[in-house]
Image: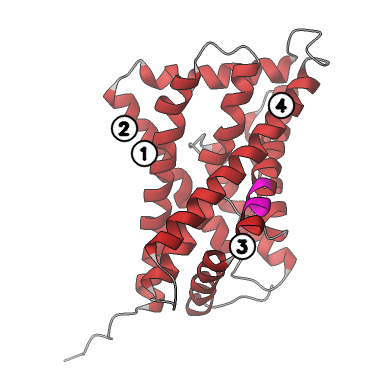
């Protein structure tokens, strides 16, 4: 595969962040909507495979197909723009402000949520034959996931919240590495291979991804999961978003930018 050296793909990261800041409101929301919907469908696919085979690792191996599809189509995830757009501000690109960064994050959040919620509603019809039967095995599995990853954290109090936040950080360390993976090759096969590896790792480790959860928890509530909307927001979505932001920016965006774009002077040898 055609490989770009780190200094080259870090420049592409900054360029991509600048481009997203200048993107129109319409295009930002459409691309975010598609990203949320495609990632939600990939989550359904992975859970379906897990239920059918009884092996979660097979679902983790196959889940990255959705991530690769959405990035090859030029769509945007909140976890990706958390990393890219601040780099354009740090690089002092003309016209890029913190207000522009926050505007982009807000629009992508709305688009991702609408896309994921649309798939949650459509798949609920599929899981229940138009709400005429009890949820099938996949729907029941999603309901139990929703309970375990909301009230399951809440029963541990502050320790549960810390665990949730750290899982969010670890998640976007890997997911944002996948975003970078899309930039380190100029061939489709190279991009897919580079994206696949970290995404498989995050899903296999059951880390917390804010956009995947925008599908899982609304769907879990519709499927009869024993938790509330407030449980979802307080004991999952909000701390997961914050963990994704800190993890992706600190461990991927800032580290790569600091050492490949703002490289320190070479050490003088005696």
| Pair 1/4: label in front | 4
Q: Residues within 10 Å of mark 3 (few under 14, many from 20)?
A: few
Taking the spot 35% from the left edge, 78% from the top edge, the residue there is 262
At x 27%, y 85%, the residue is: 265
Mark 3, residue position: 24
How far apart are labels 2 and 4 at the CA level?
Answer: 31 Å
Quadrant of the rendering where the C terminus is positioned: bottom left
Q: Earlier along the polypeptide chain: callout 1 or callout 3?
A: 3
SS at mark 4 in the image: helix
Query: Residue 141: where, in percent of width, then height?
Result: 64, 18
Residue 140 at x, y percent in the picture: 66, 15
Q: Secondary structure at mark 2?
A: helix
Residue 217 in sight from this viewpoint? yes
Number of residues whose C-alpha sits closer than 10 Å to that of mark 4, classed few (under 14), some (14–19) or many (20 or more): some
Q: Residue furthest left?
A: 270
- Name the magenta segment's main secondary structure: helix
Q: Residue at x 56, y 43 (%)?
A: 110
Dots 2 and 4: beta carbons under 8 Å? no
Upstream in the sequence, badge 4 or badge 3? 3
Which residue carries the number 2 mark?
Answer: 162
* Residue under numbered circle 1: 166
Label 1 crowd bin: few (<14), some (14–19), many (20+), radius 10 Å: many
Checking the image for residue 222, the label placed there is none
Q: CA distance from mark 2 to mark 1?
A: 6 Å
Q: Earlier in the sequence, mark 2 or mark 4?
A: 4
Residue 260 belongs to the span the image colors magenta: no
Q: Which residues are magenta?
A: 29-33
Say which element carries label 3: loop
Find out whether the residues at labels 2 and 1 contact each other: C-beta distance under 8 Å.
yes
């Amino acid at each position: 595969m055609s490989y770009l050296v780190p200094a080259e793909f870090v420049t592409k990261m900054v360029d991509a962040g600048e481009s997203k800041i200048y993107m129109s409101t319409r295009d930002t929301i459409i691309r975010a909507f598609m990203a949320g919907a495609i990632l939600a469908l990939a989550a359904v696919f992975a859970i379906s495979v897990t239920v059918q085979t009884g092996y979660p690792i097979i679902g983790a191996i196959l889940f990255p197909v959705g991530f690769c599809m959405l990035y090859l189509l030029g769509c945007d995830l909140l976890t990706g723009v958390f990393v890219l757009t601040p780099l354009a501000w740090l690089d002092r690109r003309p016209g890029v402000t913190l207000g522009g960064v926050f505007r982009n994050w807000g629009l992508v959040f709305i688009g991702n949520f609408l896309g994921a919620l649309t798939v949650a509603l459509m798949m609920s019809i599929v899981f229940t034959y138009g709400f005429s039967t009890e949820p099938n095995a996949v729907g029941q599995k999603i309901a139990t996931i929703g309970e375990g990853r909301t009230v399951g954290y809440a029963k541990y109090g502050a320790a549960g919240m810390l665990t949730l936040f750290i899982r969010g950080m670890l998640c976007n360390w890997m997911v944002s590495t996948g975003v970078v993976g899309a930039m380190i090759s100029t061939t489709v096969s190279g991009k897919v291979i580079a994206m696949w590896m970290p995404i498989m790792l995050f899903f296999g480790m059951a880390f917390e991804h804010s956009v995947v959860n925008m599908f899982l928890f609304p769907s879990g509530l519709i499927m009869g999961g024993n938790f509330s909307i407030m449980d979802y927001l307080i004991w999952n979505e909000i701390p997961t978003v914050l963990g994704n932001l800190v993890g992706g920016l600190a461990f991927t965006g800032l580290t790569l930018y600091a050492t490949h774009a703002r490289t320190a002077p070479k050490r003088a040898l005696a």
